[in-house]
Amino acid sequence: MRQRIRPSHLRKSAALVAASAIVAAVPVAAASSAAAEEGEPSLVISSLPSASPKPGEVYDENVVITNNGTAAADGVTFRIRLTRGLDFPETVEGCTYSTVEDQVRQALCELDTVVEPGASVETPVRFGAQPHALMEAVEYGTSATGEAPGEGFDDSYRRLTLTADSSADLVAVGADTEALAGGRESVTVRLRNDGPGWIQNQESDDQTALMVRIPQDTVASEVPQECAPFGVDGPSGPGGTPGRSKYVCWPADHTIDVGESLSFTFMLDIDDDATTTTGEVKATSVYDIRPEFDKNPANDKARIRITIPTDDEAGPTPSGDSSTGGDGNDPVGQSTGGTGGMTGTGGTGSTGGTGDATGTGGAGGTGSTTGSVNGNLAGTGSDGTPLIAGAAAATAALGGGLVLAVRRRRAAAKSS
């Protein structure tokens, strides 16, 4: 059962709410003052209790560092890393703050204390939830000798995953275009996060995704690499496989920031005898399990409509996304969505306007990202993945430190 923050630990931060790090260590167990016998220290750290903080609340708990070794640890370097929905509410003397790969906040704190063999010290861990907090993780601790920890987790350096008491609104954006029978048509669909929380699954590989049903009388001849064929209950082949009727698309880094729109473009070959036809897009997960954090199902589905004019009708009009509701012949309807052309670091596209500017995407920003899918879901989200593993350089440095979560391949009722 998830343990919620005790009322005494809930504190409003004056600024952008967030988290602070370890400060001074307080001895909680006496130890001999005699010089330690020759040997090595072996520090272990207690686990933080889980919580589900609301945006604006501060988590404040203590951890105990115990020396199970045969020599004293003269000074302890304590590190905290926070995902982007958390931050430090204040700076503390003795701590150095920085931002590392993938917008991870870090505090490296020097505890001026000696931990004798058999003794323990206690130190606080404080962090708070920002307005866009949702799927978060905290790394905290030291090394067995008291020096700065490396990557990966053990008894002296631990990881806590938590879900903030918030939500994220996934929006499926379809397309409405005209084309000629026997021709080819490019169709771009989108998955947008309207917040307030950012999305990065920390607990399983059931990643947030967009389900795409290809319109009848058309064939997907070119498919994005980040879109895999969808089988009975999950992805059933490598990304980019053409010729299937249903696909599931998701970002390679499993991350969707607030306001970000992910674009997926398919090339469709239209049958010679095709008439006006429709498909569908749906905001869901890679196993088509509706995310619990999305509290607004009204905009989870949208239409792909391809109008095929007859000989006595006007010629085709330029293609584009539908930005109005569906018509009386289509029960799915179309989510409101704009078109755009902002490009920047992490991808292309934006919602809610038109233009062609250049910029840099980031947390809370608007943009569109692309990625790759190799069909190997064993390498997706993980409860044991270090916070900086999202960046390629950091992943190389971590080596074999990743611990994969058990895949949530379960049968579940599909959302209507």
Image (spheres, rainbow, N blue to C red):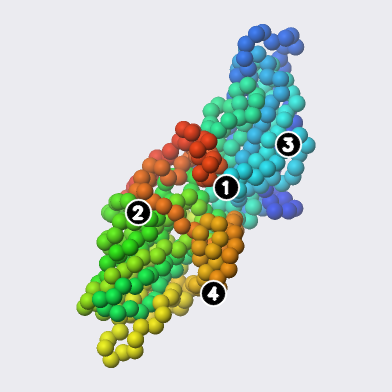
Q: Give amino acid for label 3.
A: Cys
Quarter of the image holding residue 364?
bottom right
Q: Nearer the viewer, mark 3 or mark 4?
A: 4
Mark closer to the chain start, 1 or 2: 1
Residue under label 1: 102
| Residue assigned mark 2 | 239
**Badge number at residue 193:** none
Closer to the N terminus: mark 2 or mark 4?
2
Q: Position of residue 75 (x, y in %)?
A: 71, 23
- Residue identifier under label 3: 95
Tell me where residue 309 appears, x and y as whole percent. Answer: 30, 84
Mark 3 / mark 4, whichever is N-terminal = 3
Q: Can the viewer see residue 295 in this picture?
A: no
Q: Judge depth for marks 3 and 2 and give the one in front.
A: 2
**Distance between the alpha carbons at the discs numbered 1 and 4:** 29 Å
**Is residue 261 shown above or below 395?**
below
Q: Residues within 10 Å of mark 1 (few under 14, many from 20)?
A: some
The spot of residue 301 in percent (x, y) is 40, 67
Q: Which secondary structure lies at badge 4?
A: loop
Tell me the residue that label 4 is attached to.
354
Question: Distance of mark 3 from mark 2, alpha carbons?
Answer: 45 Å
